[in-house]
Image (spheres, rainbow, N blue to C red):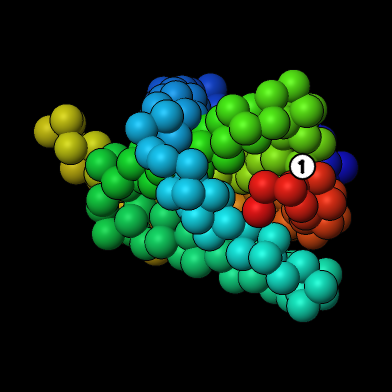
């Protein structure tokens, strides 16, 4: 019952705010392209440094427990959640949330481009195993949370002003259900990343 009700609420939200989901998805794809472009403009050492910065545990995987990786990924994504939600509440969502999704897309594009550039076909398959699985969940999470947060902001292109304060909207049962639904995808993405990290390290021993 709860599952079908959640899907019904989600379907209604996507229909009403499809433009938000579309803008954020396009921002993510554009970020992927820009990430690959940046990779090609930098030196090998710079690319390795940036890639390792995205995956700090690659330098010392033996010092990182699965719980530590989970904690780091959890705090990182919760921080982004708070930032995105705050932008919506303070009426800045229309401008800055697509930029955040763009940057997230750049990080994914850079990492995939790094693997494909330096270890060719093996890098492509490694991306499918070690990068894409968790980011499919993260993409759903950020598209959903980003779109929900953008609905809290007043449309800067509209002369009509909303009489409903964002805080009151957040207390709406439908919004709580949707936020909880998208948070599940965040948690799934973190769990997948915890188990993908050792795979990355194992295969990248000769590069990192």
For label 1, the residue is: 130
In this rendering, position of residue 103 left or right of residue 188: left
List x then y, in percent, for residue 114: 57, 36
- Secondary structure of residue under mark 1: helix
173 or 94, which lies in front?
94
3 or 113, which lies in front?
113
Residue 71 picture quarter = bottom right
Few, some or many residues within 10 Å of mark 1 (<14, 14–19, 20+):
many
For image coordinates 41% across by 61% down, the residue present is 83
List x then y, in percent, for residue 187: 74, 57
Q: Check the image and name the residue furthest to the left.
A: 159
Placement of 131 over or under 194, stated as above or below: above
List x then y, in percent, for residue 40: 42, 29
Residue 157 picture quarter = top left
Residue 62 picture quarter = bottom right
In this rendering, position of residue 205 left or right of residue 165: right
In this rendering, position of residue 23 left or right of residue 171: left
For image coordinates 17% across by 31% down, the residue present is 158
Placement of 65 over or under 166, stated as above or below: below
């Amino acid at each position: 019952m709860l599952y079908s009700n959640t899907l019904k609420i989600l379907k209604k939200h996507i229909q009403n705010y499809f433009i938000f989901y579309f803008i954020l998805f396009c921002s993510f794809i554009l970020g992927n392209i820009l990430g690959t472009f940046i990779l090609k403009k930098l030196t090998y050492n710079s690319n390795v440094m940036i890639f390792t910065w995205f995956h700090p545990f690659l330098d010392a995987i033996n010092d990182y427990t699965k719980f530590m990786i989970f904690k780091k990924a959890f705090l990182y994504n919760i921080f982004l959640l708070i930032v995105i939600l705050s932008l919506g509440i303070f009426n800045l969502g229309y401008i800055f949330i697509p930029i955040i999704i763009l940057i997230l897309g750049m990080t994914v594009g850079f990492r995939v481009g790094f693997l494909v550039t330096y270890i060719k076909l093996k890098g492509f398959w490694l991306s499918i195993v070690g990068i894409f699985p968790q980011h499919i969940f993260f993409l759903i999470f950020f598209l959903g949370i980003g779109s929900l947060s953008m609905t809290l902001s007043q449309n800067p292109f509209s002369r009509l002003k909303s009489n409903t304060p964002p805080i009151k909207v957040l207390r709406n049962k439908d919004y709580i259900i949707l936020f909880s639904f998208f948070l599940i995808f965040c948690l799934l993405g973190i769990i997948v990343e915890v188990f993908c990290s050792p795979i990355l390290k194992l295969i990248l021993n000769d590069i990192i």
